[in-house]
Amino acid sequence: MAADRKRNATRIRRKYSIRKRVNGTGARPRLSVFRSSKHIYAQVIDDTTGETLVSASTQSPEIREDLAGKEKIERAQLVGKLIAQKTIAKEITTVVFDRNGFIYHGRVKAVAEAAREGGLAF
């Protein structure tokens, strides 16, 4: 239990260190990724207004039926594609990637690469 708290505290420290440098604007919003043990969430955020422009997750109704029987990495790729589609529909093509303190590996990397394949530039 103590190891879990220490691991999360280390992630939070990395998150704040990253957030000092990564900031989303109206022209180039921030793509923030959060992963839990079961789900993965992605949001496109305009930090100047504090507004979430687009969001997608493994709990989104658009892809919920497609997730059955898939591995976590495949689910993350679907979330990446969905966030790219929604963002481009709002006429936003360039974002700043915020890994939220997580290591750029596994599901976080899968979301980023799928979003790039979907047409987002970062």
Image (cartoon, rainbow, N blue to C red):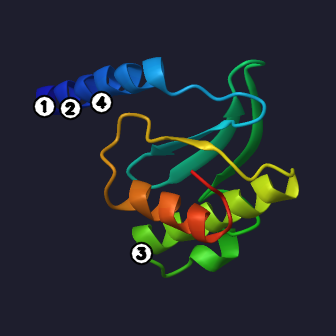
Residue furthest out toward the left: 3
**Distance of mark 4 from mark 3, alpha carbons?**
24 Å
Residue type, label 3 = Glu
The disc, 4 or 3, on the residue closer to the chain's N-terminal end is: 4
Residue type, label 2 = Arg
Q: Nearer the viewer, mark 4 or mark 2?
A: 4
| Residue at the disc numbered 2 | 7
| Within-10-Å neighbours for mark 2: few <14, some 14–19, many 20+ | few
Q: Are marks 4 and 1 in contact (CB under 8 Å)?
A: no
**Distance of mark 3 from mark 2, alpha carbons?**
24 Å
Left or right: 52 with respect to 21?
right
Per the image, label 4 sits on a secondary structure element best described as helix
Q: Are marks 3 and 2 in contact (CB under 8 Å)?
A: no
| Within-10-Å neighbours for mark 3: few <14, some 14–19, many 20+ | few
Q: Are marks 2 and 1 in contact (CB under 8 Å)?
A: yes
Left or right: 122 with respect to 62?
left
| Residue at the disc numbered 3 | 71
| Quadrant assignment, res 120 | bottom right
| Residue at the disc numbered 1 | 3
**In the foreground, 3 or 54:** 54
Q: Tell me the residue at 30%/20% (across/down).
A: 13
The disc, 1 or 3, on the residue closer to the chain's N-terminal end is: 1
Quadrant holding the N terminus:
top left
